[in-house]
Image (tube, helix red, strand yellow):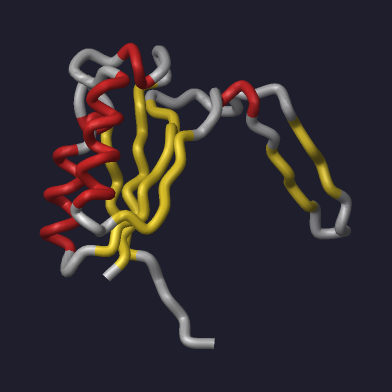
């Protein structure tokens, strides 16, 4: 079953600065996931200040804002992994190994809904 691991870091600074989560830790985790054969996809996201938000009003008019960050938040989505593992327990185990779960960060684990269309 596929699970998405949403990696949230503190809004205080980049994930690389979080205690216990060095760049080498991220490289090692990425290698473990790939070597285990469970990696489906994953990416790190650029800094929040590069985000663009699109909203569409009921009349179809769109509004685009580029002046992020957009909300007061303690955590910022920094990236994600999609893993194909047997069950939720395995996904939670991989989430606990993720460097993003350290130093005040968190990893949200959600099953991926798959539709037969």
Q: In terms of image quadrants, where is residue 4?
A: bottom left
Looking at the image, is 28 positioned above or below residue 31? Answer: above
Looking at the image, is 86 positioned above or below residue 81? Answer: below
Residue at coordinates 23% horizontally, 30% vertically from top-left? 99
Image quadrant where one finds the C terminus: bottom right
Which residue is at the front of the view, 89 or 60? 89
Residue at coordinates 40% horizontally, 44% vertically from top-left? 80
Which residue is at the front of the view, 37 or 69? 37
Q: Taking 11 as reference, is 32 left or right?
A: left
Q: In terms of image quadrants, where is residue 22?
A: top left
Q: Position of residue 102 (x, y in %)?
A: 20, 26
Q: Position of residue 34 (x, y in %)?
A: 28, 49
Q: Position of residue 101 (x, y in %)?
A: 22, 32
Residue at coordinates 38% horizontally, 24% vertically from top-left? 74
User: Which residue reaches farthest front?
Assistant: 35
Q: Position of residue 111 (x, y in %)?
A: 32, 64
Looking at the image, is 13 positioned above or below residue 55? Answer: above
Looking at the image, is 111 positioned above or below residue 67? Answer: below
Image quadrant where one finds the N terminus: bottom left
């Amino acid at each position: 079953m596929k699970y998405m691991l949403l990696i949230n870091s503190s809004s205080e600074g980049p994930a690389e600065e979080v205690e216990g989560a060095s760049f080498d830790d991220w490289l090692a985790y990425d290698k473990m996931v790939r070597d285990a054969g469970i990696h489906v996809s994953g990416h790190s996201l650029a800094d929040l200040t590069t985000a663009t938000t699109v909203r569409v009003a009921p009349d179809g008019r769109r509004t685009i804002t580029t002046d992020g960050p957009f909300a007061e938040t303690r955590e910022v989505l920094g990236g994600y992994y999609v893993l194909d593992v047997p069950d939720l327990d395995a996904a939670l185990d991989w989430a606990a190994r993720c460097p993003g779960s350290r130093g005040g960060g968190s990893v949200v684990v959600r099953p991926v809904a798959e539709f037969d269309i």
